[in-house]
Amino acid sequence: MSRSPGSVRRDTASVVISNNTDEHTDPPESESAPSARPPTQPGPAALWRQLILRWHFYAGILVGPFLLIAAISGGAYAIAPTLETVIYRAELHTDSTGAAKPIADQVRSAMAERPDLTIAAVRPARDAGETTRVMFTDTSLGESKRWAVFIDPVTAKPQGQLVVYGSSGSLPMRTWIDGLHRNLHLGDFGRNYSEIAASWLWIISLGGLFLWYRQQRQRRRDERSLPRRMLTIDRKAAGRTRTLNWHGAVGVWIVIGLLFLSATGLTWSKHAGGNITELRQALHWTQPTVATSLEPAAAKSTTKPTKAETAALVSHNVDQLDRVYDTALASGITDKAEIGIPSVANKAFTVTEVRNAWQFSPNSIAINGDTASVTSAQWFADWPIAAKMANLGIALHMGILFGLANQIALVLLAIALVTVIARGYRMWWQRRPRTGSRPVGRTPARGAFTRLPASAAVGIATLVITLGYALPWFGIPLALFLAVDVARGLLMRGRPI
């Protein structure tokens, strides 16, 4: 079926903003065909658009599934803190009223419940109806996991046991979702999936924003109405044009959120995150920690204590918990906190404010249990600005910083991203030929990079190589994309695609 020139122009103007793209601006790679007039050479702006269009297309098609999994699991993780309060209500809440028992009594009750494990820390209840969480070290659980016994602070009786994970104290349901979001429950190998998603999300988002801006700018020359057109949906449109319109406008609505998720997600990644950590260390931007040693380095003993000596030391330290906590409160620890209980001699207690809703300053101090004196302190106000931003960004990414409002915002962001991805794939499907056996639409035309000015090509290559080194799971997929694309171009030369 033939198409009118006006139809071709409309298709050429169509682009996408997140994970798939639209008609290419140059003729498709196919057999040479007689033409009534020689093709005109596109200008620099058209070449840039064509290049970004092709990269955007391939990145969206191949990285889209990773982004889809990350969006769904991330949205589930965001709302998990609220779901925990319902699912684990029996462990987290108590109906008892009255004065709380001493923290030491609560901890001893938990120790009686788990005499086989070594006490590690306690999170005293702060609000009425909350339980105290007493944590134990268990090497069989894996990295960052501990057993927690939940104690009614009024009666000092256990209300249950659960495995908790990380500094946020995630309970089993949230921990399982976190594992899915982080590594698909495949260990270190699975972390590559989330790093690919985080490494490419910002590139796909910015590329799509540029393409959507170009498309809207070409459609209307009235610059005053351009911002409104980019953010609104044309409800009169139909078919693929309507899909594109929803895809582009929703993408603009969420682009800032996507850039934030990409940046904070990279800080947790294995390879890029390691590079970021090295950079922060070199610039002294890391989060400071309190010093816990109570003796000079030269005086440290290398003799391993016996079990009886360790048990006596732990019992002595448990007796000091209430005095240590009172010192922490008097020193400025105002939010919910975790008290680290030392199990070796000449170590201070640590009292650290834990991540919680509306908690903006995770201060930490070290206290000598025998003298109830503060031996070291790290106040959030004194942290490097980069460390502050990273800490707050992580809490925001996890859905903790602003409580339920934070969680709802992240869930809506995840839903919007899923719809943008789905509409991108739908446009690819809608662009398939109406006749013939081709199941999907053509790819955008190649060749823009080789036609750019030499200075621009060298600049792009330098930037890509630098990014590929800093973000390995941006560089590796890109190298594979390029290899497949070159091979495909050689195979399809002289044949229709």
Image (cartoon, rainbow, N blue to C red):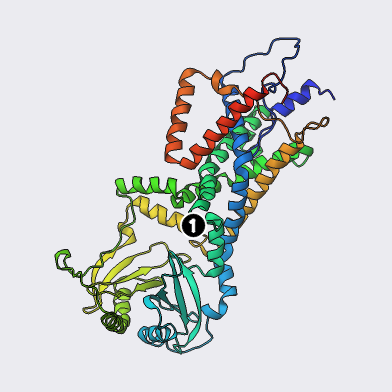
Of residues 463 and 162, the one drawn nearer to the viewer in this rendering: 162
Mark 1 lies on a secondary structure that is helix
Looking at the image, the residue that sits furthest to the right is 1
Of residues 145 and 456, the one drawn nearer to the viewer in this rendering: 145
Residue 406 image offset from top left, x and y in percent: 54, 60
Residue 11 image offset from top left, x and y in percent: 73, 28
Looking at numbered disc 1 in the image, what kind of residue is underneath it?
Answer: Leu
Residue 211 image offset from top left, x and y in percent: 61, 33
Q: In this view, does 482 lie to the left or right of 342?
A: right
Of residues 396 and 450, the one drawn nearer to the viewer in this rendering: 450
Q: Is residue 68 left or right of residue 196?
A: right
Task: Look at the picture and state if 257 lies above or below 401.
Answer: above
Tell me which residue sits at (41%, 62%) in the image.
360
Could you tell me which quadrant the C terminus lies in? Answer: top right
Q: Quadrant of residue 436?
A: top right
Report which residue position mark 1 lands on: 396
Of residues 347 and 384, the one drawn nearer to the viewer in this rendering: 347
Tell me which residue sits at (35%, 45%) in the image.
279
Q: Can residue 483 be seen in this view?
A: yes
Residue 338 image offset from top left, x and y in percent: 38, 72
Looking at the image, the residue that sits furthest to the top is 37
Looking at the image, the residue that sits furthest to the left is 298
Tag 1: Cα neighbours inside 10 Å, few (<14), some, or many (≥20)? many
